[in-house]
Amino acid sequence: MTSHSPISPESPINVDAPITDLPSWQNFVPSNEFTDAELQNAMGCRPKIELNECRQDKKICNVMEKIGLTNASKITKTLQGSIWRANDRNNKTVCVKVADQQLYKDSRAVIEGKSYDVLEDICLEQSIVKYVTQTKQCPNSITKYIKFIKSRTNFFFIMEDGGNSLFDFVQRVHQYIADQFLDIEHWKKAVRVILHQMVEAIAYIHSLNICHFDISLENWLINDVSVDILENGQMLFDLSDIRVKVCDFGLAKKFTSDACMSTKYCGKEQYSSPEVIDGCGSFDAKANDIHCLGVCAFMLVTGGPPWARAHLSDDNYVFTKQKSIARMLKLWKIGHYAEPYMIHLFNSVFRTEKMGRANIGEIQQFIAKYH
């Protein structure tokens, strides 16, 4: 690894291209194939659709009661169904992913009367999560498989409840930092804990030649972290209490060899590697996961993504290739947010495959020095 951002000879770009303002969490919307507004407009605003949805939800609750799940509450909608929380027979909270069998069979979703292709596969997802988590070696940083059930119309994938959205948590944290309720130096310590667990999870699935394809803050969960409030109003997290878990393996794939080459262009654009964004030829799926992890780490540190997309049409991406991540953070006036080791990590991750992006083993060894 080097201490400077690599300059790609394949990018004859004007190095004086303007750098845009920090894309903070305030204008960064969690990325899905469709926005919440689109989903609400398509599935939640029309009376007839609302009535059908209520009927469907009631049927889902009835099925869950029959299989021993009570106090069910819907968390959110998905393209092919919904996500729920419920209590099992031991009164333990579980998470339930429900998918419509017909939509699954057709690999599609219907939004505002239009049909869209969907790459997620709940049957493959549950088999991968079962394979990954039902071993003693599986770290706690991965949501565990519990059960998979099929009703007449839906699939029910029951798994461990990992907590709440890490994306939402990071939003709140950076608001607290901006409001001076949380000290940035304390948050840096929390970032080390979170990043260590993220790297642990990805290292494990990569050791099994499984790639996630959708590593993003939206697909990490965090527990209800204990917080102390000091006399001066400052917040302190109990760092020993922080637990994060990766979830949503709907796009994941198991490869038959260590060379996980793929042409499966998917995932959230803000996180995807330049190879996936370009969409030309095969790419290393493990290396793509690493790039996505780098964006997650950047967002933990700064509260926003480094760029909208890792492409030469993006001013911030061009700037970091021709200048450096450190210089961009300095221009954003948040250079003190990132410790030197984080800058070093960004430099080793935010490079093309041709330029030698770090692998998860190298990152794991590097992070271990600072945990």
Image (cartoon, rainbow, N blue to C red):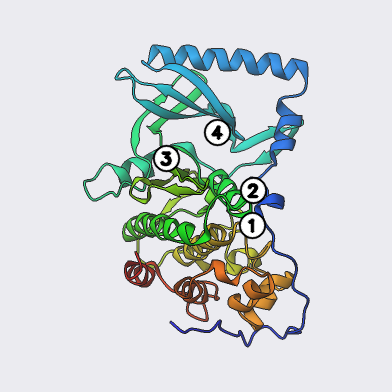
* Dot placed on the residue nearer the N-terminal end, 3 or 2: 2
Which residue position holds label 1? Answer: 269
Which residue position holds label 4? Answer: 104
Q: Residue 226 carries which label?
A: none
**Is the residue under label 3 in contact with that under label 1 (CB below 8 Å)?**
no
Locate residue 202 relative to residue 343 in the image: left or right. left
- Identity of the amino acid at label 4? Tyr
**Circle 1: is it few (<14), some (14-19), or many (20+) Cα within 10 Å?**
some
Q: Quadrant of the C terminus?
A: bottom left
Q: Dot 2: what SS?
A: loop
* Dot placed on the residue nearer the N-terminal end, 3 or 4: 4
User: For the residues marked 1 and 3, what is the alpha-carbon distance in whole angstroms?
Assistant: 27 Å
- Identity of the amino acid at label 2? Ser
**Is the residue under label 4 in contact with that under label 1 (CB below 8 Å)?**
no
- Identity of the amino acid at label 3? Asn
User: For the residues marked 2 and 4, what is the alpha-carbon distance in whole angstroms?
Assistant: 21 Å
Q: Position of residue 257 (x, y in %)?
A: 35, 63
